[in-house]
């Protein structure tokens, strides 16, 4: 049995005899030597991850102006920061958007500009008091002008991420990147075997007080992150570090198209190999790490799981989904994650980074709860015209036949189906009118083929958003096989909303 202490390992760091390997190498060592011998051979395993960490930001102290001001609102390069802290303190979030540039620039860009030692425009307003009489100020600052610039991130270094794909017939823009329609791609995050929290899944060495590599500087774990759910291997950590010591090499702002801004961070955590049990856990490989593939084409929190997949499969470049080969692409950088782990290894070997014993372990039994909603949202099934009431027509029908169906049933929207009953298009009364004027004969000449659809369990608030976004007044309700199960119209929604208001 092998037993070591953090103190013993730190002594080896100081005298230069410490043995450090990166997590990807440790899996090879454990496989070759076994956990017990690997624990004898290795003292520290360095991990790394580099990806978008939206839940990040910086506390800043600007110092007092003359005459002084108690900032009520403050903007940095036109990105608003939170000022409900103290007179000249503020916190800027990575995802906060610019008021004049929108999604092209945000809090993450301000943070990167500060680390790059660029000048940042500060503008603040106040209501004025006897001790803080000033009501506005405009100035330019750099990071050196700040008394303190402390990065404090509520949720970083997710243990693993779920894979995102899209079964719908339209492109989706999400925090998992751009998802092409009909399973044409799948995106994922995380460094796999290099991932910090996968190398210490029981939080034996990662806890409050653990010293870490944070964006090229030394930082610390200060608690469990928000949404920390280790039971489902979705652990997170809360971290802090000195922004003035960080480097843009490991801190980069980014834009997710039509979603917003974020901040890519490099985080590395050393795992002291105190015994063979820890050695075994740090020997994890990409093939051992599984995650779920979710269908983001279903716009709900409880998206269906299509299958489980390993990081080894994800990194291969494609995965199989329902018999279809789907291209995979990472949103995080394995290259940069390896660079983080390598640099942390060098720091330790040179005696520039000591291992810390956490003062308290992170919890291992927390479960993520959904938001409590005191009022249930109405769903499509509560308002849709049922399958029995919906009249459909085959794609081979004539325009004259479609017109007769609409007149007899007093419909303004007519779903078009194929011979096997699947939705292939839709026509409206307006389409029929145009067709008559232009003397078209067949439905296939006028029908809309890229139909915006919904399903019976989708909340109506999302349906209303679709109606507004695409300037339409009805959505066919379909099942997983694209069979028409009903239709929901703006008129039906208006009646439901009006009725609830009267109640």
Image: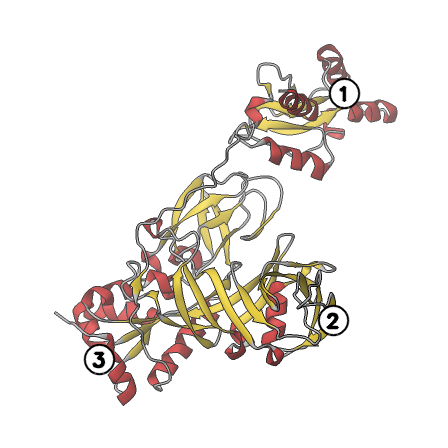
Element assignment for label 2: strand
In front here: 153 or 266?
A: 153
Q: Position of residue 69 (x, y in %)?
A: 68, 69
Q: Are the two marked residues, 3 and 2, in contact with CB atoms closer than 8 angstroms?
A: no
Element assignment for label 3: helix
In front here: 456 or 110?
A: 110
Q: Residue at x 55, y 47 (%)?
A: 184
Residue 399, labelled with which disc? 1
Q: Position of residue 90 (x, y in %)?
A: 59, 65
Q: Earlier in the sequence, mark 1 or mark 2?
A: 2
Q: Position of residue 353 (x, y in %)?
A: 36, 81
Mark 3, residue position: 8
Element assignment for label 1: helix
Mark 2, residue position: 138
> For the view shown, which residue lies furthest in the left direction?
1
Of marks 1 and 2, the one in the foreground: 2
């Amino acid at each position: 049995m092998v037993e070591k202490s953090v103190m013993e390992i730190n002594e080896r760091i100081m005298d230069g005899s410490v043995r450090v390997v990166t997590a990807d190498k440790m899996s090879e060592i454990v496989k070759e030597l076994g956990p017990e011998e690997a624990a004898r051979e290795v003292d520290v395993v360095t991990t790394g991850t580099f990806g978008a960490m939206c839940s990040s930001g910086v506390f800043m102290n600007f110092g007092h102006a003359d005459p002084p001001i108690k900032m009520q609102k403050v903007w940095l390069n036109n990105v608003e920061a939170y000022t409900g802290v103290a007179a000249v303190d503020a916190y800027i979030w990575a995802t906060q958007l610019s008021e004049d540039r929108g999604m092209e620039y945000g809090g993450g860009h301000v943070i990167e500009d500060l680390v790059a030692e660029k000048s940042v425009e500060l503008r603040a307003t106040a209501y004025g008091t006897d001790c803080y009489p000033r009501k506005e100020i405009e100035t330019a600052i750099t990071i050196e002008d700040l008394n303190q610039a402390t990065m404090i991130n509520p949720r970083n270094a997710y243990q693993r991420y779920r894979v995102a794909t899209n079964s719908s017939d339209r492109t989706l823009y999400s925090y998992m990147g751009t998802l092409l329609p009909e399973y044409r791609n799948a995106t994922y995050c995380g460094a796999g075997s290099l991932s910090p929290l996968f190398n210490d899944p029981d939080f034996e060495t990662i806890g409050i007080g653990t010293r870490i590599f944070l964006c090229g500087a030394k930082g610390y774990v200060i608690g469990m992150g928000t949404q920390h759910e280790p039971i489902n291997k979705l652990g997170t950590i809360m971290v802090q570090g000195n922004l003035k010591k960080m480097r843009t090499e490991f801190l980069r702002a980014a834009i997710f198209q039509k979603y917003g801004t974020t901040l890519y961070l490099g985080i590395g955590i050393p795992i002291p190999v105190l015994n063979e049990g820890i050695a075994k856990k740090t020997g994890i490989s990409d093939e051992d790490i599984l995650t779920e593939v979710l269908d983001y084409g279903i716009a709900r929190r409880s998206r269906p799981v299509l299958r489980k997949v390993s990081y080894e499969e994800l990194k291969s470049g494609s995965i199989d989904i329902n018999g279809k080969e789907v291209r995979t692409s990472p949103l995080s950088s394995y290259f940069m994650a390896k660079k983080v782990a390598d640099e942390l290894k060098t720091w330790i070997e040179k005696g520039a980074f000591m291992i810390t014993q956490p003062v308290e372990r992170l919890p291992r039994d927390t479960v993520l709860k959904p938001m409590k909603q005191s009022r249930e949202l109405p769903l499509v099934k509560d308002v849709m015209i049922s399958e029995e009431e919906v009249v459909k027509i085959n794609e081979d029908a004539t325009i004259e036949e479609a017109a007769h169906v609409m007149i007899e049933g007093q419909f303004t929207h007519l779903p078009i189906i194929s011979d096997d009953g699947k939705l292939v298009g839709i026509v409206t009364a307006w389409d029929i009118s145009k067709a008559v004027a232009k003397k078209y004969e067949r439905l296939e000449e006028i029908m809309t083929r890229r139909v915006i659809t919904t399903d019976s369990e989708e909340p109506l608030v999302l349906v209303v958003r679709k109606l507004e976004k695409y300037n339409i007044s009805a959505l066919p309700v379909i099942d997983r096989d694209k069979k028409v199960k009903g239709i929901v119209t703006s008129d039906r929604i208006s009646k439901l909303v009006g009725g609830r208001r009267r109640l």
